[in-house]
Image (cartoon, rainbow, N blue to C red):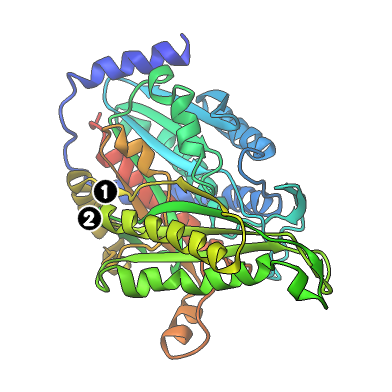
Amino acid sequence: MSIHKLALGTALLVLVAGPAAALDVAAMKPGLEAEIVADYPHLLVLYKDIHAHPELGFQETRTAAKLAGEMRALGFTVREGVGKTGLVAIYRNGAGPTVLMRTELDALPLEEKTGLSYASHDKTTWNGRETFVDHACGHDVHMAIWVGTAKALLAMKDKWRGTLMFVGQPSEEIGAGARAMMDDGLYTRFGKPSYVVGIHDLPDVAGKVMWRFGAATTTADSLDITFFGRGGHGAMPERTIDPVVMAARFIEDVQTVISREKDPGAFGLITVGGVEAGSAGNIIPDQARLRGTIRTLDDGVRAKILEGVRRTANGVAAIAGAPPPKIDLTPGAHAILDDQDVTGRTATVLEKAFGNRASEQLAVTPASDDFSIYLQAGVPGTLLTLGATDPKLVAAAAAGGAPVPGNHSPQFAPVPEPTIKAGVEAMALTVMNLLPKS
């Protein structure tokens, strides 16, 4: 039977399946933890290998092949090349709902500076330039958890019924991978799932599991602006129109859109993270390119900021007597809106399993994630967060020491133990809690 028919058959069964009964965490926990402990050495080797060999968005061929091999060895039916470099792994275990668990595959164009023995030294080409690659967002942790969760669920398959849809998604970092998978027929070829779940590590105490009701992340839009000037000798600026000055002025002036044009109590930020201009210190270039990100929660604030970015860029060029700039503002991932019911059911189970190592995340994570696209198709779900930092570093930072390196930092270094074990336990319990009991 093809994956397509398998998934469609499961989707039909979901129509008659009732809600899952509450999970008996006390009875489930000893066997689950024993399975995780037994599997951990393999997961650690997998994690270190993926960490040492990261790949950028839509380049994740080695990573996807490695995960595909892991899932086939477990008995999943796997389809590769979904959404370019993504994969879908299906396992059917009787009549019941379908739970989709997502992991990201991609890394960042960044040089790792953690000093780890398994640090990445790999390079690739990105936007026409050679760059180092680093799993500085923690997707390598997510992949190890993803494989570990699959193995744990299969080891306990006599405890649940339904279908597992494990999705390895490419290119989350540029917000394109989830859309690519959906456009490639994720929900039509493999069946629309009943629930979507995932997990993301953060610079908090390793092994701490968190959830959030409602908006969990922000909306993200990409900023790409090129200012055009007139190049010339650095000692003769009067003969030029300097695009570097325009770029600098824009970076400063655009912040007044945040500080003076939006409601001070409304969330919104603009960050310019990439500046490209010039080739030598004594040459004024003829153009300067800026890349950045715009983060909001409210659609009204978003519209105001986007309009302000355009107006500021055009104004800066006009002041300099330059041609109009090229302005590209690309919509990205929307805010993740965790489902109240799914999150509530999950929180109840995690509190029983983790005690004081489980808690509600009170603040919105000021980042984005295209996990939201799976939810926007009308599927309820939740994205958990997971502490991944040495508790001593977290305590030192809280006492006034150096800030803990966070996601996207070249020093971001999750501690595998107990992060991976806690992530597997949390996700296995989350999935089983959504499925009927055998």
Which residue type does callout 1 highlight?
A: Asp
Disc ID at residue 383: none
Counting from the top left corner in percent of width and height, residue 22 is at: 17, 42
Q: Quadrant of residue 120?
A: bottom right
Counting from the top left corner in percent of width and height, residue 31 is at: 37, 46
Q: Nearer the viewer, residue 345 or 86?
A: 86
Confirm or deny contact between disc 2 and disc 1 (CB under 8 A).
yes
Disc ID at residue 213: 2
> Residue at horizontal 67%, vertical 46%?
55
Q: In the structure shown, which secondary structural element does the residue marked by tag 2 occupy?
A: loop
Q: Quadrant of residue 279?
A: bottom right
Binning the other alpha carbons within 10 Å of mark 1 as few (below 14), some (14 to 19) or many (20 upward) gives many
Which residue type does callout 2 highlight?
A: Phe
Q: Nearer the viewer, residue 45 or 365?
A: 365
- Residue 156 visible in rendering: no
Query: How far apart are the alpha carbons under marks 2 and 1?
Result: 6 Å
Counting from the top left corner in percent of width and height, residue 427 is at: 37, 47
Binning the other alpha carbons within 10 Å of mark 2 as few (below 14), some (14 to 19) or many (20 upward) gives many
Quickly name the residue at label 1: 338
Give above or below for 100 relative to 76: below
Q: In the structure shown, which secondary structural element does the residue marked by tag 1 occupy?
A: strand
Q: Earlier in the sequence, mark 2 or mark 1?
A: 2
